Amino acid sequence: MLEVVFSPKSRQDLLDIADYIDKDSRPNARRFVGKLVEQCQRIGTAPLGYPGREDLAPGLRMAALGSYVIFFRVIDGAVRIERVLHGARNLPVVLGVQGHAGA
C-alpha cells in the first residue's frame, strides 16, 4: 500500500465538488466526497492497475467514480492525487494539455 497524498489543486477540486452538491443536499455532499476520498485511498493498493493517460500528461493515470475522474501519478513511492474532475469537463483544457485546441 502506497501513501496517498493530495495536490493543492485536488484538495480544491474536492472542496468545489462538495460546495456544488451542498447546494442540493449537505448530507449527499459529505457522503459523495467521502466516497471520492475512499477511492483515492484505494488507488494506493494497486496504482499501476489503473489506466494510464499519457495522452494528457506524462505519468498520469486515472480512476473513475461515477461521473468523476481521479487523476494521479506515482511519484517517489507515493500516489499523488493531481485532480478530481467531472468527466463531462473538457479535460485536455482543464489539465492544460498542449496541442488540444478546440478539443
Image (cartoon, grey):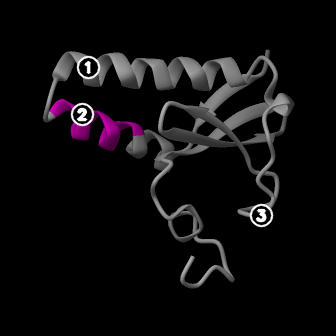
Residue holding disc 3: 55
Q: Residue at x 67, y 18 (%)?
A: 42
Secondary structure category for the residue under label 1: helix
Query: Where 13 falls versus 4 (above or below)?
Result: below
Residue range corresponding to the magenta coloring: 14-22
Q: Is 52 left or right of 97, judged from the image as shown? A: right
**Picture coordinates of residue 21, whole percent (x, y):** 24, 33
Task: Indicate the position of residue 99 as horizontal and vertical percent values.
Answer: 69, 83
Expressed as whole percent of the image width and height from the top left, the position of residue 23 reads: 13, 35
From the top left corner, tell me how far across and down residue 61 is, in percent.
74, 44
The image shows a total of numbered marks equal to 3
**Amino acid at the residue labelled 3:** Asp
Which comes before the other along the chain, label 1 or label 2?
2
30 on left or right of 36: left
**Placement of the C terminus among the 4 image quadrants:** bottom right
Image point (54%, 83%), residue name: 102
Residue nearest the observer in this picture, 60 or 77: 60
Q: CA distance from mark 1 to mark 3?
A: 33 Å
Provide the residue designation for mark 1. Answer: 28
Which mark, by number, is residue 21?
Answer: 2
Q: Earlier in the sequence, mark 1 or mark 3?
A: 1
- Which three-letter amino acid code belongs to the residue tagged 1? Asn
> Type of residue at label 2?
Ile
SS assignment at label 3 = loop
